[in-house]
Amino acid sequence: MADDNTRISETEIAVHWHEEEYYSPPESFIQQANFRDADALRKFELDNFPDYFAEYGHLLQWDRPWDQVFDGSNPPFWKWFVGGKLNASVNCIDRHLAKNRNKTAFYFIPERPEEPKQVVTYQDLFVRVNEFAALLRDLGVKQGDRVTIHLPMVVELPVAMLACARLGAIHSVVFGGFSGQACADRIVDSESDVLITMDGYYRGGKWLSHKDKADIAVDKAKEAGHIVKHVLVFERHPGTYTSNAPLVAGRDILVNDVIQQYRGRRVEPVSMRAEDPLFLMYTSGSTGKPKGVQHSTGGYLSYATATSKNILDIQPEDVYWCMADIGWITGHSYIVYGPLSLGASSVIYEGVPSYPDANRPFSIAEELGVNIFHTSPTAIRSLRMAQNIAPQNYQYHFKLMVTVGEPIEPDVWRWYYHVIGRDEAVIVDTWWQTETGGFLCSTVPALDKMKPGSAGPGIPGIHPVIYDDEGHEIAAGSGRGGNICIRNPWHGALQTIWKDPNRFVSTYYGKYCKNPESKDWHDWPYMAGDGAMLASDGYFRILGRIDDVINVAGHRLGTKEIESAVLKLDDVAEAAVIAAHDDMKGTVPELYVSLQPGVVPSDELSARIVAAIVTEIGPIARPRKVWIVPDLPKTRSGKIMRRILASISNNKEIGDVTTLANPEVVDTIHQMVRP
Ligand code: 6R9
């Protein structure tokens, strides 16, 4: 990606980092940890690939054992646990019933403190998943069908996911905050006949009507030629439908009304091949169209389970709380599949962590005895900036804390460690992606020292490497950044992009494949799309995306997706989105647009531009600022120079612009943005 639009300049990545301070896990943590045998690490050396992954496969209950751990005969379409059969809902629920039916699977904490919490045992979850699976089956959902789920953070979300898994149907969860249009795009691409939604939910102290988005989604899907047959509507308060959007006869079904007929119903779990897809999760890439990342049943589930055990150190008596949304991959792997597969008790919190005030996380931790706490740098920064937080007034003890989603500044890390973790919690900074199914880089909490701002080495079984643009390996400790890749395949990785295998191959394997004819996995390193540096201690520091993806508060947004939403307006000629630094969210989008000849800039137009983005994608993509400029800086070949715009927004050195087709416009824009 040595292209003009590269987001991280050579000078930026050549910066030397000086934080060589380390923190050690406390002895009390080491004594109790799942993975505390340093000798066991040796098993995971690359020479032992792929056999070491058998150990991860054995964490699951199989209907039929696998014949072969890894089949690499058709690169890069790797197959894992070939011949094995299993069902994910059985692994997450049924297998725990004999010993732990009365154990809490989920605590549901409504956002409004006055609303009582719900305790969902493994037995309760079993009953709810079976009943809902029976309903789905009666609607015609069968093995291999796709089901789109557009729900907020409520227990009904994992219930719906696991009901699909029980039937062998492929779920596609769309983040609840996404717009109806964004939901429609995912319904159409996945060809879902069924959409699962809810009337509304509480967030930030307000009731948000949600069912309206389902109506938009179904209408927009229809315009694109796809008919949704059934819309299943949960009610946030069962029996009280609360939404301005009326129910559509013949299409919408209130789950609470019909589920009565399914009381006590059981659904025989469908025994799936390890390689059958478990779910799709759409994520942003370099083009305007989100891609349907496809994850397998056996490979994905065993990877989520193993990493939850080894890195999150989840144990039977722990209470675990991950603040991510289940609508993102972190919630899939580390609220639903990993913790349930281990039989853990975990927390689903409906709302924003700062409601009714910034001490809510501590009060929840105290009430439930949470001892593993999983959140993002953005949430940590916002706690740090909040007035009146007083963790010292709450009784809780975290043995382990997680940070995920974006790079964490060493300063913020230290605050997390001292103030939230009280110098006693081990921190794991886990680097991974939607595509990777689970963690790739992190310290093993009992074995590795922590280093603020660095994710750590590859986790057991994962062998990362940094390549320069020509494919040469960049040595540890050289102080140079490059593209982080993984040398070896692993079973949590995506299988393909739904209906787009070519895009799968070119995106992740196109740049660094050593020989496209090769049948040897050594020739097919996986390219993550992140810039990173490798220190001489073997720790990776992640620098951020190298492609056209912006990371806002840990959420991935495609710049092209935002730009295409804006370009739908007739008044706009060109649009460029850049990542602007933000103290709280890491980065936020800023938008530069030029207008069609004769169109006059106005506040009204800026507002329409913002509205177009919110309608097409959702409020998370809202730009911090819209700059209407006379022209966008371009190369002589017509490429928009986003890097220059980013430098202006972020008040950085712009560098040489003389080779541009229109260098004078840089000055004009600079005057506007930084008068
Ligand atoms: C899990 C998740 C993936 C992108 C990834 C990288 C960034 C994630 C990080 C991190 C620095 C960490 N990222 N974890 N950067 N340190 N610990 O977030 O998946 O939404 O697909 O985003 O997030 O840039 O490429 P996803």
Image (cartoon, rainbow, N blue to C red):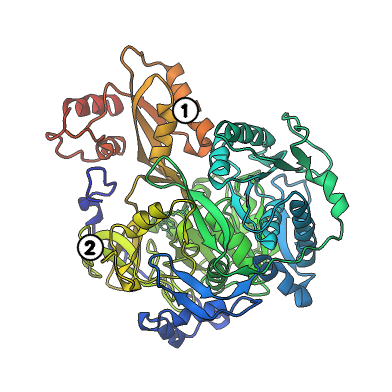
Picture coordinates of residue 627, whole percent (x, y): 35, 26
Q: Quadrant of residue 221?
A: top right
First in residue order: circle 1 vs circle 2: 2
Q: Nearer the viewer, residue 384 or 480?
A: 480
Q: Quadrant of residue 462?
A: bottom left
Q: Is residue 418 visible?
A: no
Question: In the picture shown, does residue 84 fall above or below 588?
Answer: below
Q: Quadrant of residue 193?
A: top right
**Residue depicted at 20% across the width and 60% down the height:** 470
Picture coordinates of residue 494, whole percent (x, y): 47, 61
Callout 2 secondary element? loop
Q: Please, what is the three-letter code of the amino acid marked with disc 1?
A: Val
Q: Which mark is residue 471?
A: 2
Question: Label 1: which residue?
Answer: 610
Q: Please, what is the three-letter code of the amino acid marked with disc 2?
A: Gly
Picture coordinates of residue 54, whole percent (x, y): 51, 80
Question: In the picture shown, does residue 671 fall above or below 201?
Answer: above
Closest to the camera, between mark 1 and mark 2, is: 2
